[in-house]
């Protein structure tokens, strides 16, 4: 019996020591408000930083997609030479040997225009020399103009794969911006909920400690009565068991608080090791205060106009519409208008019958012909082609239509889910507020009943078991009151998130994409 008494006393002392470690610690204490944790999360949260990089990548993708319009420059140099021996004809005469040497340089710029035109333009020149037919030749040639022009008139006219890629990249960038906003809103909600979890955890520790102290005191009182023979030993054991149970609950609450505090640190810092030696202490309490009027119709209106995920769904539908338009265009045959225009020049050396050069030639003479436009040339034509069955194109078109219709249904599903979530959240706000009132009253009645039962026990008209039951009622009612307060505050946060006003409520403005 003496051992059991010492056990109860040491357990109570251990609980008080634990309480002292919670309230007075060597770790520096940092008092934080909801605004503090929100600000720190916006500055330091890993998920936000990662999503910000994804946002930047989407912007780079749009910038890079316009590279299809960048012209391509090419420079080609070619040298060729050939020699042919003279041949005997049917009369036995041998034709002269012939030699040919040619150097050519071609400069070209080719590309693709935003309206579907493909082009290639450039300037080229060459130098040919040698002998043929018993005479020598030496000449310079040049050319300037568009060697290739092709403009689609049906397939790839109003949209093609390149333009579709650019449009989709722009839509993806918009979706990425909205995904970033969604992530920010979600982190704000998470850190606010965790903050109020921490507030409740501190209150749960107080409740568990108070319950243990009540049970331990009762165990000591009963033990004294057992020693003088006023009560049976069984009553003492039941009280000691209750005290130990409440002490175990207290230790569990200490762990719960540590877990929640780590959750807040994980959301608000990128250097957890530096924050490890700091203890966070919330500066606010759980209160059932109506921060703003709750209006279902207004929240529905806000949810469908301000929710970034809902706006992103519209862009997803538009992406499928672009793909649908592209596949529809591919059902047409290819009908391309082709053409070209160039100016040519030629400057040849003159030789006499003896093979002596009478007048020379140079590249300037060839370019002079281009300037005078003495040798213009042009061409135009039409190219028509089409697969005989269009099986692949028709299949792609049907798949695109189905995907587009599916995206519209997904948008409608999200819209309905937003309305349901807002309605559920407002219902939870109202019910939680009423629960706060009833659970507070229940806690007060339970405390009064416990006080009355303790007085009856002192007069000998009650039993320890009944007092223990009353103590359980007080502990349970306190926990229910705290839970209803937590549910109410979290429901307000959820409403801010679900109706899209959480940034406004926290005075947060997002910067534009860089």
Image (cartoon, helix red, strand yellow):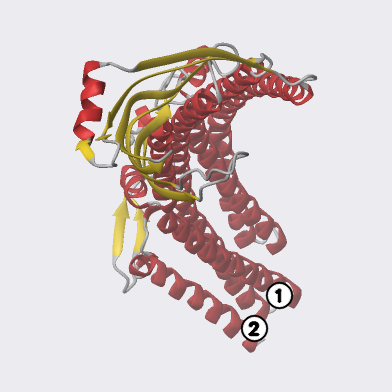
**Residue marked by disc 2:** 4
For this rendering, which residue is in front, 379 or 410?
Answer: 379
Residue 360 at least partly seen: no
Residue furthest to the bottom in view is 3
Q: Quadrant of the C terminus?
A: top left
In the image, residue 435 lies at what x, y percent?
58, 33
- Residue at 56% from the left image edge and 60% from the top image edge: 211
Work out how far the residue at label 1 is from the one at label 2, CA to CA, in angstroms.
Answer: 8 Å
Q: Position of residue 218 (x, y in %)?
A: 59, 67
> In the image, what residue occupies the spot 24% across and 42% down?
356
- Quadrant location of the N terminus in the rendered image: bottom right
Q: For residue 465, what is the image quadrant? A: bottom right
Left or right of 472, for residue 127: left
Residue nearest the viewer, comparing 426 with 348? 348
Q: Is residue 291 above or below residue 59?
A: above
Q: Which residue appears farthest toward the front when viewing the image? A: 91
Among the two numbered marks 1 and 2 on one chain, the one whose residue lies closer to the N terminus = 2
Residue 173 location (% of width, % of height): 44, 32
Label 1: few (<14), some or many (≥20) within 10 Å? some
> For residue 426, which quarter of the picture?
top right
- Comparing 235 with 177, the one in front is 177
Query: At numbered mark 1, what does the secondary structure look like: helix, strand or loop?
Result: helix
Residue 145 against residue 136 in the figure, above or below: above
Q: According to the image, label 1 marks what residue? A: 237
Mark 1 vs 2: CB contact within 8 A: yes
């Amino acid at each position: 019996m003496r051992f059991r008494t010492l056990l109860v006393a040491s357990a109570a002392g251990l609980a008080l020591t634990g309480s002292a470690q919670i309230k007075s610690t060597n770790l520096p204490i940092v008092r934080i408000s909801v605004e503090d944790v929100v600000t720190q999360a916006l500055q330091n949260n890993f998920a936000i930083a990662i999503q910000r990089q994804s946002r930047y990548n989407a912007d780079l993708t749009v910038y890079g997609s316009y590279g299809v319009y960048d012209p391509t420059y090419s420079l080609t140099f070619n040298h060729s030479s050939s020699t042919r021996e003279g041949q005997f004809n049917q009369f036995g005469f041998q034709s002269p040997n012939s030699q040919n040497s040619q150097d050519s340089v071609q400069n070209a710029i080719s590309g693709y225009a935003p309206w579907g035109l493909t082009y290639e333009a450039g300037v080229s020149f060459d130098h040919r020399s040698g002998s043929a037919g018993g005479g020598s030749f030496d000449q310079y040639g040049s050319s300037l103009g568009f060697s290739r022009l092709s403009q689609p008139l049906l397939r790839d006219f109003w949209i093609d794969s390149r333009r579709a890629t650019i449009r989709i990249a722009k839509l993806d960038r918009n979706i990425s911006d909205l995904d970033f906003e969604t992530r920010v809103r979600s982190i704000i909600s998470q850190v606010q909920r965790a903050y109020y979890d921490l507030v409740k955890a501190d209150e749960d520790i107080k409740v568990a400690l108070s319950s243990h102290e009540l049970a331990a005191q009762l165990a000591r009182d009963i033990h004294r009565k057992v020693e003088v023979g006023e009560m049976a030993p069984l009553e003492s054991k039941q009280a000691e068991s209750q005290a130990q149970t409440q002490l175990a609950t207290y230790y569990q609450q200490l762990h719960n608080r540590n877990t929640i505090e780590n959750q807040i640190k994980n959301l608000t810092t990128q250097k957890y090791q530096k924050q490890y030696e700091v203890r966070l202490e919330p500066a606010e309490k759980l209160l059932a205060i109506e921060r703003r009027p709750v209006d279902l119709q207004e929240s529905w209106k806000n949810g469908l106009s301000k929710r970034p995920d809902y706006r992103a769904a519209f862009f997803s539908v538009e992406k499928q519409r672009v793909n649908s338009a592209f596949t529809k265009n591919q059902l047409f045959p290819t009908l391309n208008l082709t053409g070209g225009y160039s100016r040519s020049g030629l400057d040849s050396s003159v030789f006499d019958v003896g093979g002596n050069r009478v007048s020379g030639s140079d590249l300037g003479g060839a370019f002079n012909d281009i300037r005078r436009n003495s040798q213009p040339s042009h061409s135009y034509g039409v190219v028509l082609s089409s697969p005989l069955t269009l099986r692949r194109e028709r299949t792609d078109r049907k798949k695109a239509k189905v995907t587009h219709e599916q995206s519209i249904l997904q948008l409608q599903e999200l819209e309905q889910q937003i309305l349901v979530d807002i309605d559920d959240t407002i219902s939870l706000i109202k019910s939680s507020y009423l629960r706060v009132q009833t659970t507070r009253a229940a806690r007060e009645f339970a405390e009064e009943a416990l006080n009355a039962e303790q007085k009856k026990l002192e007069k000998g008209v009650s039993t320890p078991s009944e007092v223990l039951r009353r103590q359980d009622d007080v502990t349970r009612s306190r926990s229910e009151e705290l839970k209803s307060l937590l549910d109410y505050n979290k429901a307000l946060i959820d409403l801010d998130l679900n109706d899209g006003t959480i940034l406004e409520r926290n005075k947060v403005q997002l910067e534009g994409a860089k």
